[in-house]
Image: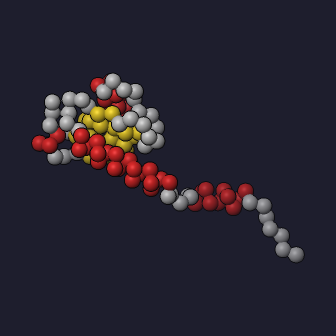
Amino acid sequence: MSNLATTNEFTVRLARPTDSRQLATLAALDSAAKPQGDVVVVESEGRIVAAKPLAGGRTIADPFVRTAALVQMLDLRANQLRAASSARKPSMVERLRVLHERPAVRVN
């Protein structure tokens, strides 16, 4: 079992489309389904060792790597990203669309 405590270097980030193969491999190692949608991952030494779908669901992790502390950080970051997403202000395009769809007001 690999010990990430000796590495001390890891990255918590959103998965990119190029991570698809690594996520599939990680899911197979953990006997789980590949996470779908937006996924936050922990990467160490260029390899994804844990992943969590932002929409909720099971966290997957490499069973051959000590990831318990990293999974806790992953859960924390996923919660932060979900909170930020729900508090997001509408974009300029979204606000203009609402104005455009609103009926015109006539003043006599």
Q: Residue shown at 50%/54% (left/top)?
A: 86
Residue most extreme to the bottom: 108
Residue 87 percent location from the top left of the image = 50, 58
Q: Quadrant of residue 10?
A: top left
Residue 75 percent location from the top left of the image = 34, 45
Q: Quadrant of the C terminus?
A: bottom right
Residue most extreme to the right: 108
Residue 58 percent location from the top left of the image = 38, 35
Q: Is residue 64 left or right of residue 15?
A: left
Q: Quadrant of the N terminus?
A: top left
Placement of 108 over or under 73, stated as above or below: below
Residue most extreme to the left: 6
Of residues 92 and 60, the one nearer the viewer is: 60
Of residues 6 and 100, the one nearer the viewer is: 6
Q: Is residue 68 visible?
A: yes
Residue 79 percent location from the top left of the image = 39, 50
Placement of 80 over or under 105, stated as above or below: above
Q: Residue shown at 29%/45% (left/top)?
A: 72
Of residues 43 and 93, the one nearer the viewer is: 43
Placement of 16 over or under 86, stated as above or below: above
Q: Is residue 25 visible?
A: no
Q: Quadrant of residue 64?
A: top left
Q: Is residue 53 left or right of residue 62?
A: right
Q: Is residue 102 left or right of residue 74?
A: right
Q: Is residue 76 left or right of residue 96?
A: left
Q: Residue shown at 73%/56% (left/top)?
A: 101
Q: Quadrant of residue 24?
A: top left
